[in-house]
Image (cartoon, rainbow, N blue to C red):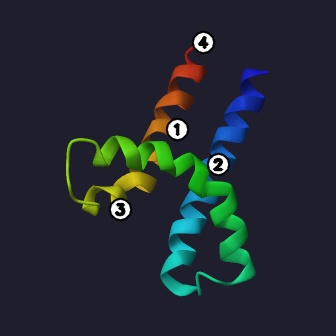
Amino acid sequence: MINGVIRLLNLAQGVLVLYCVLSWFMDPNSQVMRFLARVIEPALRPVRAMLQRGTRSATWGGFAPMIAVLLIEVLIVILRGL
C-alpha cells in the first residue's frame, strides 16, 4: 500500500513539474493548461498562503511549485522509511 502512495506522489510531482514547464510555453487558456490548473492549483493554494503570510508581497507565491515538490519529496522519503 505504501508503494502505491509513493507512486501517486511521484505522479503528482511529475504533473506539477509538467505544469510549471508548460506554463512557460503554452497559452494559459488552452485546454491542457486549464485542465492542469484545475488539478494543480488547489494543492498550491495552501503553499502560496503560507509563503505570503506575514508579507505584503505576492512575490513569494511564485516559489510555491518548488516548495510543493520539495514537500512531496520529504513525504516520499518518510514513507520509504516506514
| Label 2 or label 1, whichever comes before in sequence order | 2
Q: Which residue is mark 3?
A: 62
Q: Which residue is mark 1?
A: 72
In the image, taking residue 4 as reference, residue 14 lies left or right, namely left
Query: Relative to the observer, which residue lies in front, 30 or 25?
Result: 30
C-alpha separation, residue under disc 2 versus residue under disc 1: 8 Å
| Label 2 or label 3, whichever comes before in sequence order | 2
Pointer 1 and pointer 4: residues touching (CB < 8 Å)? no
Task: Nearest to the eye among marks 3 and 1: give it.
Answer: 3
Residue 76 position (above or below residue 50): above
How many other residues sit within 10 Å of disc 1, few (<14), some (14-19) or many (≥20)?
some
| Label 4 or label 3, whichever comes before in sequence order | 3
| Label 2 or label 4, whichever comes before in sequence order | 2
Task: Nearest to the eye among marks 4 and 3: give it.
Answer: 3
Which residue sits furthest front?
Answer: 56
In the image, taking residue 71 as reference, residue 33 lies left or right, namely right
Q: Locate residue 58: give its quadrant.
A: bottom left
How many other residues sit within 10 Å of disc 2, few (<14), some (14-19) or many (≥20)?
some
Give percent across and percent down for residue 32: 72, 76
Disc sitting over residue 81 in the figure: none
Residue 2 position (above or below residue 15): above
Give percent across and percent down for residue 43: 57, 47
| Label 1 or label 4, whichever comes before in sequence order | 1
C-alpha separation, residue under disc 2 versus residue under disc 3: 18 Å
Pointer 2 and pointer 4: residues touching (CB < 8 Å)? no
Q: Look at 22% across and 59% down and name the residue there.
A: 57
Task: Nearest to the eye among marks 2 and 3: give it.
Answer: 3
Disc sitting over residue 12 in the figure: 2
Q: Which residue is mark 4?
A: 82
User: Which secondary structure, mark 2?
Assistant: helix
Give percent across and percent down for residue 31: 74, 79
Q: Which residue type does callout 4 highlight?
A: Leu
